[in-house]
Structures are given as C-alpha cells and as structure tokens.
Amino acid sequence: MAEAASDDHCPTGLSGAMNDASWAADRYDGIAGEDITTGVMYDEDGMEHCFDSTQDQASDLALKVGRDLGIFHRKGRTNIVDHVEVKVAVGYTPQGPEWPPANLRFDFDRDAGVGAAVLLVLDRYDDIRAWMTHGGGAQNDIALTHDSWSPKERQFPSWSLVDLPKLREAICQWAFNDNLPPSAVGWTPMPDEEIGWL
C-alpha cells in the first residue's frame, strides 16, 4: 500500500480509489509542481518497494504490460508509464516466472563423445527465444538431429557439437536450475523458425 501525500493511506483497490475523491485531490495537491514524485509500496511480505516518476526499468515494464493488455498503442511511448501509481500497480502484479515453458532437444554420438542441443523458451512476454549449443567442433562426419520427424532437414551443424560430459551437465542445469540457457556449454541465439518444432 502506498502512502498518500497526507497521513491517510491510499485506497486498498481500484474501486476504492475511483470513489475516493478526497484521496485523489490530496495526492494531486501533494505532487503538484514536483519534477519527480515518489511512492512506497509494501508487498504481502511487508517488504518496502520504492518507485519514482523517472524513466526507468519499472517504466519499461509498465509499457510492456500495458501494450500486452492492449491499453497502450504498440508505437510511441506514453509518459503515463512513468507515473508512480502505474509502476506500483504493475510492480505489485505477479509477473510469473522469468522463464516459463522450456523445451530442450538433444542428440549425441557416444563413440565420438560429442553431442548438441537446441533450447526453445517461451518467456514471460510470450516471446519465443531459441539457442543452439556452440562448441566449435570440427567433426563434419557426425550426423546428429534435433527433430526426429525431419532428421535430415534438422541436422545439427558441426559448430554446435560439444563434449558429451558438458552436454550432460547442461541438461541437468536445464532441468533443475533457474537460469537459461544453461551455463555448462556455449550457446548461439537462433531464429526460432529455424528450429521449427515448438
């Protein structure tokens, strides 16, 4: 809950704010003429979060959320996203995990001791991100694929081959860690259309 300009607390919700003209007038009087306004929000754990009316990452997130909801136009930038109240509303809204659904496909050649993987992730903005392992392997005679439906069309390039123990480690990191792509191997960003099976 943010503090208003007076000693009164902000309304607890949107409907309360819409029907509380005295709070709105008090807030407006408290920030009139200020170049930068500030606000404090306390989350459900009692942690304090400070916001101000400068252009920052909270503004960018508010713009992204507003565009995703169809509130703001996709072109241009509205300055309402710099307002403390908008940042508080977006900051208090659970955003979900940083990396929701992730799909990893891999293939390996046990005798050669190498393998390769592709990773597709649907991030919290519903954008698909794709990576392919990058090991710089020079073994051109190894045919590995990341698509069992189209194995010849979706072969791994030789530069994607990595040592098999590193690939195993990357698979474990993908399954049990929060950071993507896994750090055990090198990755090259790829257009998701080139992967094609999500």
Image: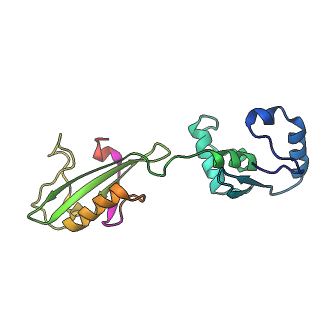
- Front position in the image: 74 or 30: 30
Image location of residue 48, percent across then percent down: 70, 58
Image location of residue 63, percent across then percent down: 63, 45
- Front position in the image: 35 or 148: 148
Residue 12 figure quarter = top right
Image location of residue 116, percent across then percent down: 22, 58
- Front position in the image: 42 or 170: 42
Please name the residue shown 30% across and 60% down the image.
172
Q: Give the number of callouts.
A: 0
Quarter placement of the C terminus: top left
Is any part of residue 136 visible from this angle? no
Residue 11 figure quarter = top right
158 vs 193: above or below: below
Span of residues in magenta: 183-192
Relative to residue 140, is residue 96 drawn left or right?
right
Relative to residue 127, is residue 162 drawn left or right?
left
Is residue 181 highlighted in magenta?
no
Determine the residue located farthest toward the front in the rendered image: 45
Please name the residue shown 32% across and 44% down the image.
193
Image location of residue 192, percent across then percent down: 34, 46
Please name the residue shown 55% across and 46% down the image.
95
Is residue 187 highlighted in magenta?
yes
For the rendered model, the colour scheme is rainbow
Is any part of residue 100 visible from this angle? yes
Please name the residue shown 65% across and 47% down the image.
92
Relative to residue 123, is residue 70 drawn left or right?
right
